[in-house]
Amino acid sequence: MGTESQYIQYLLSGLTTGSIYALIALALVVTFNITGIFNLAIGEFVTIGALTAVSLLHAGLPATLSYCIAVLVAGLVGALVERATIHPARNASVLSLIIITIAVSIVLRGAALLIWKTYPYTLPPFVTAPPLRLLGASLVPQSLFILGLAVVAVSLLFIFFEFTYTGKAVRAAMMNQTAARLVGINPGRLSLFAFTFSGAIAALAGIFITPITMATYDMGFMLGLKGFVAAILGGVTNATGAIIGGILLGVLEAFAAGMVSSGLKDAIAMVVMIAVLLTRPTGILGSTRNSA
């Protein structure tokens, strides 16, 4: 493989993983904009979605039905987490709420270990076809589904926020929660929606990526961390920035791992986060919450 083909291969790999980071970052940004906190347990919902789908598939359910139920389960777990932990502590400080999400993350990871043990699992690819050739680089068909998922998710979110009453209520609460309360918008319900939505979209990300990366009980930790970095990179209040941040982080990781060392793949995320926080704390497209 020539040098140009290698660069294209890095780019395709980066776009694939970056799309997953973007989806997780998107879930984080929506939750942050509505509740004012980062749901640091988001990575565990990636795990729940992927491993629940694996279990249902092994139980004999059709693949599509298994994936739909897994997404619903993750969404319900997100709703349960919000009602059981965040809602009762809604008047606590932001720091306390973030610590609660960390505790939830540890609990969910422990539960996943008890249920699925330490074995790696996989899901069949959505289509069985040989890798595609593109300018000397190869791309597995599953990557196209991951890229397509990111595009569809962003498009549906745009329609939701622009053309539905609930979406406009969410935007109003994002801009000014006090004013939103005055016009009858219930922030508690929006918080429930945010956790349910973020759980479901993270589960989708887990299902789509498992045919390529496999799934384990602790797969969500690093994915959640990368999603968090992508959200910081793009701007914590900006959904478009979250998508750009995720894609950019995935591409940077792929080039760093390919051109320098694969050991840098995870370290690059931390380097990027530190660099962004030092040079542009609001991210590429973000603005501070106070100024939003």
Image (cartoon, rainbow, N blue to C red):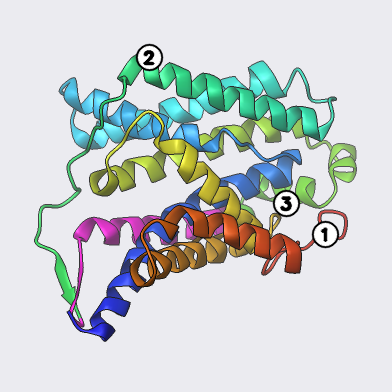
Distance between mark 2 and mark 3 Cα atoms: 39 Å
Task: Please provide the residue range marked out in magenta.
Answer: 135-160
Crowd tier of the residue under label 1, counting other residues whose Cα lies within 10 Å: few below 14, some 14–19, many 20 or above: few
Q: Is residue 116 magenta?
A: no
- Residue shown at the point (84%, 30%) measured from the top left: 93
Majority secondary structure of magenta residues: helix
Q: Position of residue 169 (x, y in %)?
A: 73, 45
Amino acid found under the numbered disc labelled 2: Leu
Q: Nearer the viewer, mark 2 or mark 1?
A: 2
- Do we see residue 30 in this rendering? yes
Distance between mark 3 and mark 1 Cα atoms: 11 Å
Distance between mark 2 and mark 1 Cα atoms: 43 Å
- In the image, 66 versus 183, the foreground residue is 66
Name the N-terminal-most of marks 3 and 1.
3
- Do we see residue 280 in this rendering? no
Q: Which label number is shown at residue 171? A: 3
Crowd tier of the residue under label 2, counting other residues whose Cα lies within 10 Å: few below 14, some 14–19, many 20 or above: few
- In the image, 253 versus 202, the foreground residue is 253
Residue identifier under label 1: 292
116, above or below 136, in the image: above
Name the N-terminal-most of marks 2 and 3.
2
Q: Nearer the viewer, mark 2 or mark 3?
A: 2
Residue identifier under label 2: 114
Which quadrant would residue 34 be assigned to in this image? top right
- Residue shown at the point (85%, 48%) measured from the top left: 176
Q: Are discs 2 and 1 less than 8 Å apart at CB?
A: no
Amino acid found under the numbered disc labelled 3: Arg
Q: Position of residue 77 (x, y in %)?
A: 51, 23
Q: Is residue 159 magenta?
A: yes
